[in-house]
Amino acid sequence: MRNVKPSVATKQLRRDKRFGGTTEEGPTVAMKDPLVLRHHYMDLVGSRYGSGSIPSLHEDGDGPELDASCNDDANPNYGALSCGGRLGLGT
């Protein structure tokens, strides 16, 4: 969901019964596919800070960088990471 406001992406993901990517999942995706951040950066809408900031993962020239922004702007370089489900840990 590139170039979509994080708030809009979150609503769309809920409608589609999908989960927004988290600060744990974003770096995992980037480690599995190191070139992914060259094509687009990730809004990690499944994690929110108390301030309402949205974490994002992008490349800054020296490598991947995890950051957070209070902006709810659509950006053609960013897209919301999502997944269709998560495996639960058994007890």
Image: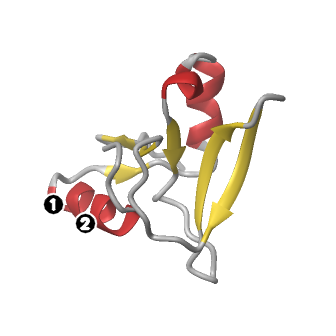
> Label 2: which residue?
11
| Quarter in which the N terminus is drawn | top left
Residue placed at 58% from the left, 16% from the top?
35
Residue 72, picture quadrant: bottom left
Left or right of residue 20, residue 4 in this image:
left
Image quarter of residue 85: top left
Within-10-Å neighbours for mark 2: few <14, some 14–19, many 20+: few
Q: Residue furthest left?
A: 15
Q: In the shown orientation, is residue 64 left or right of residue 79?
A: right
- Which percent across, then down, holds residue 30? 61, 27
Q: Quadrant of residue 74?
A: bottom left
Proximity of marks 2 and 1: CB atoms separated by less than 8 Å: yes
* Residue shown at 25% from the left, 66% from the top: 11
In the image, 60 versus 16, the foreground residue is 60
Label 2 and label 1: CA atoms lie apart by: 6 Å
Label 1 CA crowd tier, 10 Å (few <14, some 14–19, many 20+): few
Task: Return the residue at label 1.
Answer: 15
Residue 10 in view, yes or no: yes
Position of residue 8 in the picture relative to residue 64 (left or right): left
- Local secondary structure at mark 2: helix
Residue 89 visible, this orientation: no
What amino acid type is highlighted by mark number 2? Lys
- Residue 12 to residue 89: above or below: below
Helix or strand or loop: what does disc 1 sit on? helix
Measured as percent of width and height from the top left, residue 60 is found at 75, 36
Q: Would you say 29 lies left or right of 61 here?
A: left
